[in-house]
Amino acid sequence: MDMPAAGNATDMPPPAGAYRPHRQRHHGRFNTLGFLTLLGREVKRLRKLAMLFLVAPCLSAALYFTVFEFGLGDRRGTPEGDAILAFLVPGLVALSLLTQSVQIPSFSILYAKLEGAILDQLMAPVGAAEMLAAYVLSAMAAGVASGATVWIGFLIFWQAPMADPALVLLFVVLGSSMMATFGVLTGLISMKWDHLSAAMTFVFTPLIFLSGLFAPVTSMPAVLRAIVQANPIYYAIEGVRIGFLGQGQDQAALAALVLVGVNGALLAIAATLLHHGYRLRN
């Protein structure tokens, strides 16, 4: 048998993934390529979950609206009844926006941990900043798409114009980023599906429903009003509602300041936990 020439072995290309000492890669403090790759993966996953975060929230919002409309009784079709429904619509849009923003990243992170895919991600040259940005932006995209779908659905059978679209956009961004970061933290803390389910059931659901979603805070007892106003989700929903209805511009400034502060604190905590690999490396 003829043996291959010794010189031919060096001409063969190295296998995929082999170490190449001559190739130098400089990513800088922020690996843009790694961030875009991770973001692209999350967006592709969202396309497969479109029925979950687009169609399901529309059905839920339609059911809520129908129950409230028939619950008005004799006031249905009157100016007073229409005012109640007009107050309700922005809240349902914000409900869909915030709920999907928190669920998407928590599910993605926990799934990657349980399946072991997070180890491949940790070995890649992708740091905490790139991971946090990719998870938060993809969750915001899902939340915004969900809220927009619910709003468009309302436009078919109910007049829901925006008095101040720029203000609505501001609170959509602030609210969805806050809940997306909440979702990242929930995914990091959770070690199994029971933990994630408990967080959604006993933390986020009460926070969302104790946020002035279905009733104005001015009509609540003093103790309940204080609890609602201590909830940061209240300011996200209230800001969206102000943008839709065009009332309470002074409150909008306070709501924006609260959300900016909460966003900054949550992002700092999430970045620190991701940097230290909290519950990711075990």
Image: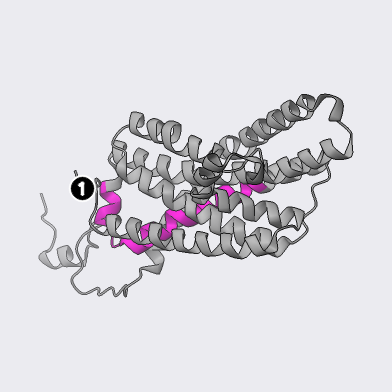
Relative placement, left or right, of 85 versus 60 is right
Main SS, magenta residues? helix
In the image, 263: left or right of 280?
A: right
Q: Callout 1, which amino acid?
A: Arg
Residue at point 66% right, 41% down? 219
Residue shown at the point (11%, 53%) measured from the top left: 2
When asked about the image quadrant of residue 224, the answer is top right
Q: Residue 131 in the image: x percent, y percent?
A: 37, 57
Q: Is residue 124 magenta?
A: yes
Identify the magenta region: 119-147
User: Which corner quadrant holds the C terminus?
Assistant: top left
Comparing 55 with 2, the one in front is 55
* 64 falls in the magenta region: no
Q: Residue 65 in the image: x percent, y percent?
A: 73, 32
Residue 143 in picture, x, y percent from top left = 57, 48
Residue that appears at 34% across and 28% down: 194
Residue annotated with mark 1: 281
Q: Residue furthest front?
A: 222
Q: Is residue 16 visible?
A: no
